[in-house]
Amino acid sequence: MMKRWLLAAGVIVGWMMMSIYALAAAPRYLPPAERPALYADQRWPTNSFLVLAWHDVEDGAADQRYLSVRTSALNDQFAWLNDNGYHPISVQQVLDAHAGKTTLPEKAVMLTFDDGYSSFSTRVLPLLRLFKWPALWAPVGSWVDAPEHSLVDFGGLKTPREKFATWKMVREASESGLVEVGAHTWASHYGHQANPQGSQEPAAANRFYDKTRGQYETDAQFEQRMGADLARISNKIREVTGKAPRAWVWPYGAASGTTLKLAHQQGYQMAFSLNQGLANAASLEDIPRVLISNNPSLRSFASQIAQVREPDTMRVMHIDLDYVYDKNPAQQRKNIDVLIQRVFDMKITHVFLQAYADPKGDGNVNALYFRSRWLPMRADLFNFVSWQLQTRAGVKVYAWMPVLAFGLDPSVPRVAAWSPDTGRSAPDNRHYLRLSPWSAVARQRINDIYEDLARHANFSGILFHDDAFLTDFEDASPDALKAYRAAGFPDNIAQIRADPQLLARWTRFKSRALIDFTRQLTQTVRAVRGPQVKTARNIYAMPVLDPQSETWFAQNLNDFLGTYDWTAPMAMPLMENVPVKDANAWLDRLVRQVARYPGALDKTVFELQARDWRKGAGQDDISGEMLNGWMRQLKMSGAGNFGYYPDDFINDQPRMAEIRSAFSSYWYPQK
């Protein structure tokens, strides 16, 4: 983190001038009347549809081991949908809308039922016939195929065979004209060991870890296993119904890009997860669904549906795995437990979790917390902590990764800065030591590292670190100069800088090059991990406050907003040398600059600082009271998404009692 401070504090004199100018604005409160209307009150986007996911249906008590609802509750839910203007649609209607042949009705809803329970035939199908509504039914092949009077292994729970449908029931449902039969795997609806620590992760989306050999499944082994599963369930559905299955439903909602590729090869045209939000016919590879569980009251059911269109709110803690890591396994496990408890108690939504080792704190990465081809592994820790945070603390985890600052062997070209004093080019040790984004070798090895992360870890998104920048003297490496020539620029930095128009074009060229490289890395991750992986990228404050400063960073707010799911400005006033008394005004101006772009606040997360890196170690903690005040200022200015870096969970810094009333709505005002 010290490198961040060095970059922001003194490399370019103009930054200080801009920070001082930022103080002219007074803190501002955004009145409720000026805030955007609830999404529930707005018209649905064209070809959007809501997908609801049920499981078992029972006349008596709703057994939550099977995510059951009572028959009477399902009947009330169907009646509510009918009375409130929802229009149930079929798989074929969605595919036709995707092909541009038709348009979905307003408030379109798809009804889906998972696992293959016999109750679908005895309780759900009669209701579908009564309402004349279509539905998607996705059974697990091996459960439906179980011998008569046997027990089905339902995730370790021995379940009577009659709980599940027969293939005769599946055929009859298909012949009803109302039911599309999809696939929920043949026999991959279970969790298996996915890391050395023993985490049980969804088998259809994660590679198996063999603890006896200390090895993960290879790509070939994983594809063979899931390819065989897909072929078997697809062939069986085709045999029973006479129709090739078109809808793939992920067990536990957990997706895999590798398995999705295999599903496409089997002819599947849509894939359903349990992610949040409305679906749209334009995108059928990651269809979100609302899970109906705990036999909800009709009020709770209606509330779930009313809230589905509201955008995600992000409240995020930055976590350094270097704080977790310990050579003593017992102490490391204690550290993990303290972390999980703190995140759970904070009641936030996201964690940006460091996937690389940086014990020196200089941002130059020489080791990772996952297995990789090109850098040593400090400990196989990222996947385990990520899974613990997801399952025990209930948060989404983004893998926090460098873009360029990997310490590969010296033969891989680095970013070089041209010096106007000497006329020579060399890496600038005042900044992160970055690999040149124009080196084919560097790009390929970084791409491999991201692919290794996706292969060996389970996470919801990627945070591209703040090392993805280029100053107005960079990059002057041979590969970069060659790329400039190919793009029509002089291969001379002095000549480029001497012409304002040429400098502006060169700046845009570099900004787009960094954007394009992170897009490539995103595609690599999604190809392995799945299309559901979200992206976020750090941006320095100055390119937000003054777009002209793109020259100094090769970062552009408008580009970021159009490329990433989340843009993460470094809202760190003390790092920008803003006096404490003026910090709220500076934060307000930062928010207002983002708000100039329509819809930008819904996809921007402001990252505050919990340390003042200008001070010495042990004296650099920022009080929870001050951080609380900054959070409140962000909210008053109209920002709904924010977080802070770093979190010292071992020492309760910042103090949870001092910040969580502003950080999490769970604690304020009632609790």
Image (spheres, helix red, strand yellow):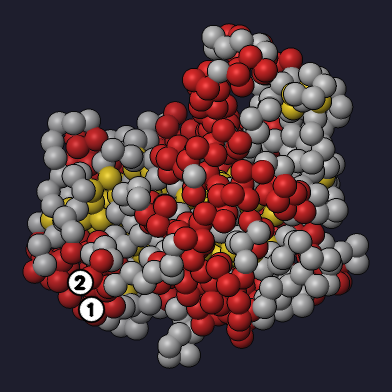
Amino acid bearing label 1: Leu
Query: As displayed, is residue 553 above or below residue 567?
Result: above
What residue is at 25 percent from the left and 66 percent from the top?
34
Position of residue 295 measured from the top left corner of the image (x, y, whole percent): 33, 77
Asked whether 289 or 419 is in front, the reply is 419
What residue is at 26 percent from the left and 63 percent from the top?
36
Position of residue 386 measured from the top left corner of the image (x, y, whole percent): 65, 59
Asked whether 124 or 426 is in front, the reply is 426
Amino acid bearing label 2: Gln
Position of residue 227 measured from the top left corner of the image (x, y, whole percent): 53, 35
Q: CA distance from mark 2 to mark 1?
A: 7 Å
Query: As displayed, is residue 187 above or below residue 162?
Result: above
Asked whether 227 or 550 is in front, the reply is 550
Asked if residue 575 lies left or right of residue 661, the reply is: right
Position of residue 239 measured from the top left corner of the image (x, y, whole percent): 34, 37
Quadrant in which residue 91 is drawn: top left
Camera sees residue 617? yes
Residue at the spot of label 2: 77
Residue at the spot of label 1: 298
What residue is at 43 percent from the left and 76 percent from the top?
64
What residue is at 49 percent from the left and 44 percent from the top?
546
Say which element carries label 2.
Answer: helix
Checking the image for residue 492, the label placed there is: none
Label 2 with label 1: CB-CB less than 8 Å: yes
Q: Earlier in the sequence, mark 2 or mark 1?
A: 2
Say which element carries label 1.
Answer: helix
Quadrant in which residue 470 is drawn: top right
Asked if residue 425 lies left or right of residue 579, the reply is: right
| Label 1 neighbour load within 10 Å: few <14, some 14-19, many 20+ | some
- Residue pushed farthest right? 328
